[in-house]
Amino acid sequence: MNKDDIKALLAKYDYPVPRYTSFPTAVQFKPVQDAGTYFDCLSTLTPGEPVSLYVHIPFCHSLCHYCGCHTKIVHSYSPIASYIDTLIKEIELVSRNLKSVQGVSRIHFGGGSPNYAKTQDIKRILDTLGRYFDLSSAQIDMECDPRLLNDAKISDYAALGLSRISLGIQDFDAGVQKAINRIQPFDMVKKQIEALHCNSIHNINFDLIIGLPEQTLETVNETLDKVLELQPARVAVFPYAHVPWMKKHQKLLEKYEMPETVLRYEMAKLTETRLKNAGYETIGIDHFARPDDSLVRALKNGNMRRNFQGYTDDPARTILGFGLSSISQFEGAYTQNTTDAPLYRKTVDNGEVPLARVLTLTQDDQDRRQLIEELMCNFTVNFKNYKNIPVPHSALALLEQDGLIEIIGSRLQVTQSGKPFVRIIASHFDPYFKKESNRHAKAV
Ligand code: SF4
């Protein structure tokens, strides 16, 4: 495909679509007053079946101007300590209602910057979870801000059993880091990687962002040189989502030159080529992993999944989310905690679950969830396995004309040129999706 063809495709298909880390997406969740729904969901768990636990710690020490997360900037520890007291109460409140001791496949600390919390508080959370769940097989992961990581924390994390650390790198270029208000020199990160390996934490993920202000193909190339020098096990490359109508601080970036769509596409292609040439395997739309990483094994064995954290080899179908704004996923429902911090604390202090929004899934939702997940993970689906979902033939014919997919019998196969547009392809199976919506980031 030549540059003009790519430009034409981008002009036609680069419109806002969900990331499909869940289906239906969180915008479909409905407000709820009665926390009973949450306990009904808990009662559907199969006794002993491993679940995944998500723990949200929504604090950071400095605001990155591209940030799209639920987080609060604090400069003293007391709000974090007080939040963790409430979080522990919430875990106890929920866990006392479990019918049996569930196994746990994964504990994921997300945020915010979970490593802003003191190790003793992370330990308190893990100890509390350990009183109610069987953590003997749990893999513990944490998202970390490199600016808040040091040798002492790394050795503490190793002692607590953390085995995967995701570092928010974004870009190593000094000019880009200044523009996004996130200064973290390469040498600092390099020392941390050495310390992580010294403490036997070899599962290291890097998150990079494409489409940031001041980024050029040259800066991306130089960032990739540095990434490859450090050899992380996984690299996730996310497109910057500019949504200033939802995240007002992102307007601060508008004074800089931002890469336009075709340049972003070229940056993404450059990243893919460099990582592939260095031996990384491509995983779905935005992940790369070394061949010895468990995500590559999961992809090859056909059991890779996609959930709120992106692509995963976590086999659990249920995720219990704890903390402000956290989402829980059940076979037949999604639930979400309140995003209102004072209300979160007041509700938990009153001995109630801080539930705010719920979506009960119909059988059709569950079938479509599986189809969309399969498409996002494997770039192919066989409609024979989804007999109750009508095939949108005329929409697919247009995608096929544009070379994004091929229909071979009952199978839809995303082509090589269609892969960057797989979210657009998935949206044709999403009856809730409205093209005009400005709730999502652009497709590429
Ligand atoms: S560290 Fe992450 S969560 Fe915190 S402000 Fe920066 S981007 Fe947002």
Image (cartoon, rainbow, N blue to C red):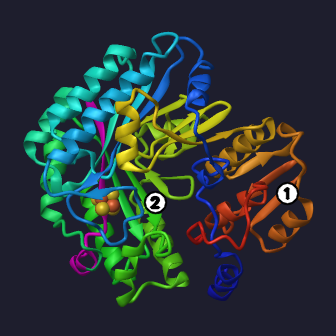
Q: In this picture, is 406 found above or below 203?
A: below
Residue 55 visible somewhere in the drawing: no
Viewport quadrant of the C terminus: bottom right
**Badge 2 amino acid:** Lys
User: Which one is in front, 188 or 275?
Assistant: 188
Residue 314 rendering spot, x and y as whole percentages: 49, 33
Can you tell which quarter of the image residue 115 is in?
top left
**Badge 1 amino acid:** Ile
> Around disc 2, counting alpha carbons within 10 Å, would you say few (fewer than 14), some (14 to 19), or many (20 or more)?
some
Which residue is the site of mark 2? Answer: 276
Q: Which of marks 1 and 2 is in front?
A: 1
Residue 403 rendering spot, x and y as whole percentages: 77, 71
Mark number displayed over residue 240 = none
Q: Is mark 2 within 8 Å of ligand 1?
A: no
Residue 355 visible somewhere in the drawing: yes
Q: What stretch is highlighted in magenta?
A: 162-178
> Around disc 1, counting alpha carbons within 10 Å, would you say few (fewer than 14), some (14 to 19), or many (20 or more)?
some
Can you tell which quarter of the image residue 425 is in?
bottom right
What residue do we see at 80% from left, 53% from top?
A: 412
Q: Is 107 in the magenta?
A: no
What residue do we see at 57% from left, 50% from top?
A: 21
What residue do we see at 41% from left, 40% from top?
A: 293
Q: What element carries label 1?
A: strand
Mark 1 or 2, nearer chain start: 2
Furthest toward the left, the residue is 152
The answer to whether residue 138 is left or right of residue 152 is: right
Counting every numbered tag in the picture gives 2
> Label 1 to label 2, Cα distance in Å?
27 Å
Q: Quadrant of ligand 1?
A: bottom left
Q: In this picture, is 180 found above or below 214?
A: above
Mark number displayed over residue 407 = 1
Q: Is mark 1 within 8 Å of ligand 1?
A: no
